[in-house]
Image: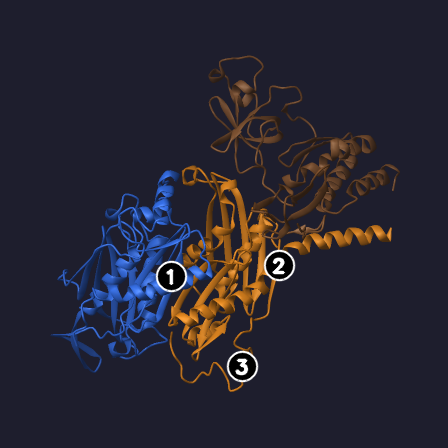
Amino acid sequence: MPKNKEIRLIDEEGRRVDGRRLDELRPFRIEAGVLKNADGSAYIELGNNKIIVAVYGPREAHPKHIALPNKAMLRCRYSMATFSVEERKSPSPSRREVELSKVIREALEPAIFLEEYPRTVIDVFIQVLEADGGTRTASITAASVALADAGVPMRDLVAAIAVGKIEGKLALDLNGIEDQYGEGDMPIAIMPGYNLVTLLQADGIFTVEEIEEALSMASIAIKKLYEAQREALKKKYIKIREEVLSYEQGT
Amino acid sequence: MPIYAKTKSIVVPGELLAEGRYQAEGAVHVEGKRIYSKAVGVVEIIQEKRRKVIKVIPLKKKYIPNVGDKVLGKIIDIGVTNWTVDINSPYPAILQATEALPRPTDAARMDLSKILDVGDLIVAKVVAFDLTRDPLLTIKEKGLGKVTRGTLVEIDPAKVARIIGKKGSMTRLFKEILGVELIVGKNGRIIVIADDKDKEALAVLAIKKIEREAHVSGLTDRIKRMLEKYVKGG
Amino acid sequence: MSKVHDVLTTIKRESILSLLKRGERIDGRGIEDYRDIKIETGIIGRAEGSARVEIGDTKVIVGVKVEIGKPFPDTPDKGVQIVNAELVPLAAPFFEPGPPGEEDIELARVIDRGFRSAETIKLEELAIIPGSKVWVVYIDIYPLDYYGNLIDAAGLASAAALLTTEMKKWRVEGEEVEQLDETMPLPVSNVPVYVTIAKIGNVLVVDPSYEEELVMDARITFAIDEEKRICGIQKGGPAGLTPDEIKEAVRIAVKKSEELRKHLPTNLK
């Protein structure tokens, strides 16, 4: 984390580089069912982040021996497009992408009824098209929608956001610059219906009290994302219903 | 004992539907007295004689075989004494030669590809399935066997019940109004058999319309009017 | 290499759970107890620093090499820290040879983040010719015997190795660097220790052993620095933790960090 004394991340009025307050989320939108081929899919924009997720499965395991006898195997691949970042990223998977694929999978697993499809595989493919801080949490939020869109049985949706530290203060949803020049970042994923934290990581320095406060801050933002996830899933069907009913009324 | 969901509304995983002593069916999971939806689906609240049923019908579902199901399969591989059949499921099925031939014969000496070749479509029945091994099929009963005519349409397996309708009421509409026969597989595959191409095309459109509008009430009427309109020359 | 999924019978998970209800673990420990810890340093002659740690039956060896290399473009006047881990097949029957899998990479990155957040290695003091030559500190982690909780053992071994690393002094003449025979300790301060807590059912246990890892729902690792601040967190495993469990876990971790720290060699300055 290079520190640049020239950059002020919070101004005198408490506003951040993009004008937000410390506890403000960036503008976001979530859409479900955006891809034809995938069994389920979702698209999220959060600030400048643009991420698309496709779910294939439950489907047959290839090769067969990787399948688990009593539950479905969840596989997750987080990948950043070469043009998603400032300096072109090499197309081969980086160590960061490998780690993130693992933690994202572990964030989604608790929500899925894997036991209902033994000996099968559920694949989650995450493609980051544009990155600006907080891609792993945005990916989790979109992946939950894609899984539900695919008809995968789930206990709950999982929504996620990161809480960071800039100039000694906790700030919600760090963007790229804040992540780069700040003092720490804590990505958090929660299953809101169960109040269960399924992703928790941190880098930088935090006190015990800051961790507790960060969890509270994240919970509030996550509730907003959760509402948007639900709306995105219902939207397609409500739209069809409205179309049919208005057509019927017209004829 | 509150019910939170409105009947016929769309619900999503984790949504709390009701709390209390209700019968919960379909894509739901129960924790103590709370009934939650497990899927994106339509909730139905049905009043039975002495109790209320809270049911969620999912809008998308992969096909998991049940013994007794009629399915439409595609031959994808030929073994020494069996065929591997794609039944549009995460579980590929096996059709053993003994379940395809009328009399017990020395299956190993037969060239199975002469009976059923890769790419062939069959109407089959599931005779065995448990979650520890792949499903087994048979084509030995009446009405089963290789499909020789018609057009294949694939829909989401969750919508199959709507294609059939209550006690076959929907498939009957196709037959009575349009003269089109539908062979409906529980696995989301349908064979459309019509005596002319236009009727076949209309039937396919109607099937797609059923799939799309399955969650909007009044579907049977809408399909009836769609088919009648064509027959009347509209 | 990847850890092959091991199918433990339900009976074993249930017996572990029923013992835990009474505050007991299958190896007789209390739920907040570490297994026996042994540390040896300076065991690999060719490495500038090294340490071998045993936590119970888990054995990890870490070697530190300090070599001249290029700085990162955005920090031309700082040394470089690189952490690598290899889950070699000799350590467990289910570790397979091959390129790093997700577990090797996660282990390395978690250890790396703890030291980086705590700014343990004083990278500003490791520039040789700013912009072109700096010292690169390679921390390489090799588990030798896997019996649960690699993270804490690897963390302790890395810390002990760094604290006892002796690097060559150097002299710069124009564009040339001369490495001298005289050595100096690697400049380090604020060394973190790593405490991993597993959630089994709804009990939190410190330092999960192999059997406990097979039945655990989730694990959470905290990196704790010398001022008892948290300089790294990593939750792992296919289940979740409630906010209350996390709060309890962090408090336990801070408490245990003091105990772990006592095993480290003091930074002789």
Q: Which residue is nearer to you in this view: C202 or A213?
A: C202
Asked whether A33 or C205 is in front, the reply is C205
Asked if disc 2 and disc 3 are in contact, CB closer than 8 Å, the reply is no
Rendered location of residue B228, percent (x, y): 85, 38
Report the residue at 82% width, 30% height from top.
Answer: B176
Tell me the residue that label 1 is attached to: C249
Q: Nearer the viewer, residue C255 or A229?
A: C255
Question: The numbered mark 3 sits on a residue in which chain?
Answer: A
Crowding at label 1, few (<14), some or many (≥20) Cα neighbours within 10 Å? many
Q: Looking at the image, which residue sits at the far left?
A: C181
Residue A136 seen anywhere in this rendered image of the structure? no
- Which of label 2 and label 3 is nearer to you? 3
Side of A111 where C164 appears, left or right = left
Chain (blue): C
Task: Sort mark 3 into few (<14), some (14-19) or many (20+) by Cα contacts within 10 Å.
Answer: few
In the drawing, what numbered circle is on residue A15? 3
Q: Which chain is brown?
A: B
Q: Which residue is mark 2?
A: A31
Q: Secondary structure at mark 1?
A: helix
> Label 2 crowding class (10 Å Cα cut-off): few <14, some 14-19, many 20+?
many
Give the side of residue B133 with respect to residue B20, left or right: left
Which residue is nearer to you in this view: C43 or B207? C43
Label 2 and label 3: CA atoms lie apart by 29 Å
> Mark 1 belongs to which amino acid?
Ala
The chain containing the residue under callout 2 comes to: A
- Pick whichever of labels 2 and 3 is earlier in the sequence: 3
Tell me the residue at 26%/50% (across/down).
C88
Q: Which chain is orange?
A: A
